[in-house]
Image (cartoon, coloured by chain):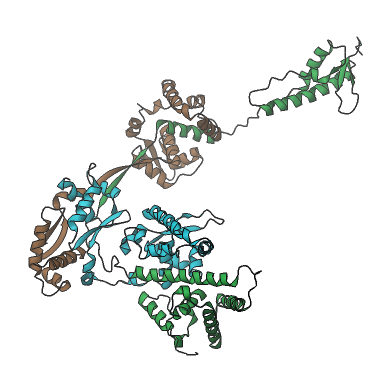
Chain colours: A green, B cyan, C brown
Amino acid sequence: MVDNDPIIDAQDEVSLDQWDDVNETANSPDLLNLNIDGWEGPLDILLVLARNQKVDLRQISILELVKQYLQFIDDARNLKLELAADYLVMAAWLTYLKSALLLPKDPEVDPSPEELALRLQLRLERLNAMREAGARLMARDRLGRDLFLRGAPEGLYIKKRRKYYCSYFDLIQAYGQVSARTQPVMHMVKKRAVMTLEDALARVSQMIGMSIEWTSIEAFLPTMVPMDGDDEFHYMLRRSALASTFMATLELARHGVLELEQKDSFEPLMLRAMGDGDG
Amino acid sequence: MDKQDIRAVEATLFASEKPLTIREIEQYVENDIDVKQALNVLQEDYDGRGIELVKRGDQWHFQTAADLSYLLRKESDQLRKLSRAAIETLSIIAYHGPVSRAEIESIRGVQISKGTLDVLMETEWVKAAGRREVPGRPLIYIVTNDFLTHFGLNSRKDLPGISDLKASGLLDPVDMAMEELDLSAGENEQNDVELNEDNSESDGV
Amino acid sequence: MDKQDIRAVEATLFASEKPLTIREIEQYVENDIDVKQALNVLQEDYDGRGIELVKRGDQWHFQTAADLSYLLRKESDQLRKLSRAAIETLSIIAYHGPVSRAEIESIRGVQISKGTLDVLMETEWVKAAGRREVPGRPLIYIVTNDFLTHFGLNSRKDLPGISDLKASGLLDPVDMAMEELDLSAGENEQNDVELNEDNSESDGV
């Protein structure tokens, strides 16, 4: 089957007519010898080989097809044609498929070789369908070749006058933002939720006089009225109040105004006034 | 229907350098004209003349009658120059569209060079139509109204042989066909109907 | 006369890119056609339609009926919203004019593209008003009477002053202002009214 005739015109641009020539030539089994560049990949070759069988693609013999493809690859190698990797990958896969089809059936193998063969056949059918559709499409009466629009249309012309709109508010707002953007930047520190040590000292000093019994430090904290939807604020304020109040009680204890007691770690911190003692 | 209105639609389409949608025609004629009806009247008027009024997708235009092509046929380089890869890719986009590049490649069994899609986009027969919502979000392609106009198709439903291809499942992906083979053969018909419905949605291409 | 002959002449003339003489038409159609007679038949057929067949000198061509040519040239308005950059620039010219481009940029804190000023000139709300006698002699811009009319102002003094802007929250840092706009889209109108009322007290920045 070795034949040096360059049967396939390896042009990039193959017109439809040339293309049909290609297929017809290749359809003659004696002349299956190719300049590899003329082919659109292994599936393309397989399709031509399959069509060589001159039967409905649904009835092609996959084994025969595999045999022919491998023969084709061998020929190409003998001619020292450079084969792209995907041709060889296909050859390897088909070799595997062939042996799987020939060997006794192994029910463990999934997908089964029959399924693989069927898939290949379906792919060929699909490619073939599109190839034929392309040919039919190109053969239609086409505008500019068979059918013509008016040769010298006067042309339609709409002059679009652009009108812009902008509302008064847009204008003023834009100026406001320009001004804001270019004004010296003013940093405003957000007011944090704190109770100062001074406030705590004043509060505890005032309240301690009334409680002679041990009282939990909690009782000295200001009553928190939860702010609407601002749990974060509330939580921060409470923490700050607790810290400041604790500091204040330590300070007052140092001055002998009150005494502190805690039964154990994490037990409530209790405080009470120191008798009359002023120190 | 008022003769003057029909004349207005006729003149507008006749003067236009390109096919027009009804909406575009409306921009030129008086507001209250029923353009659709005028087009139907015109289509009948021109039936059998040397010029015919045709609808391609949602666009209308006058063109020379198909049977006179033997007098006027003109081969232009631009039309001759499509490569085989481009023709196949175009068919796949037309028949399977919207399709991603990977889907085209899986049907052709070969990678498509960047140039192939570019050439098709340049003819304005093919355009990108968004992305497929799958991993990688690939671009998907469809044929345009220009495609329909050039090949004389009213819609994709008129693509040669498309109903046969659909009926035989050849427009389904291989995986889907395999699944179907597993299912009972009786369901094929139902499937077919669904596919036809799909098509009606894609008419506006 | 054979209908097919008439159709051939019709299609040939339609597809031709230029008017044709009878002799030229004869080259396209079958030899034995009486082109002259076909043209006469066609001229009658098209009489009163939106398309007419006319003879100029010894050349024939189809053209849109003369009384409908007004349809082919239309004017229409296209409404567009001014871009953010254009609105800002406009406001700066309104408040600070006459200003040069460099001055506008220094107030905006952002460069302006040439297109922005062009668009504003196109609106006819802004015009060049001579040159500033400084090195480079830059053009200076002011707002026009059209601007005042469009925005319902008697004079530039009617524009709200900085303090008014502050009072209405329009001087807040940008992001806060945006937030407020989002929160109280419904209040915009009210805001607008307030600004208008403020006008009387404005200090004409």
Q: Report the residue at 46% width, 74% height from top.
A: A57
| Image height of A140 relative to C99, above or below | below
Q: Report the quarter where the C terminus of chain C lies.
A: top left
Position of residue A18 in the picture relative to residue B63 (left or right): right
Locate residue B22, reporting x and y percent: 28, 49
Residue A257 makes an appearance in the image: no
Identify the residue at horizontal 40%, vertical 62% (top origin). Answer: B94
Dividing the image into 4 quarters, which one contains the N terminus of chain C? bottom left
Drawn side of residue B192 relative to residue A245, left or right: left
Residue B166 picture location, percent across and down: 42, 62
Report the front residue among C169 and B195: B195
All told, the count of numbered labels is: 0
Of residues B190 and C201, the one nearer the viewer is: B190
Picture coordinates of residue A143 (x, y %)? 29, 65
Q: Nearer the viewer, residue A133 or C31?
A: A133
Nearer to us in this view, B42 or A144? B42
Question: Toward which corner of the image does residue B147 lie, by quadrant?
Answer: bottom left
Q: Position of residue A240 (x, y in %)?
A: 76, 26
Q: Residue at x 17, y 50 (%)?
A: B7
Query: Relative to A103, is A180 above or below?
Result: above
Q: Is residue B196 left or right of residue C181?
A: left
Q: Is residue C75 visible?
A: yes
**Residue A248 image-quadrant placement:** top right
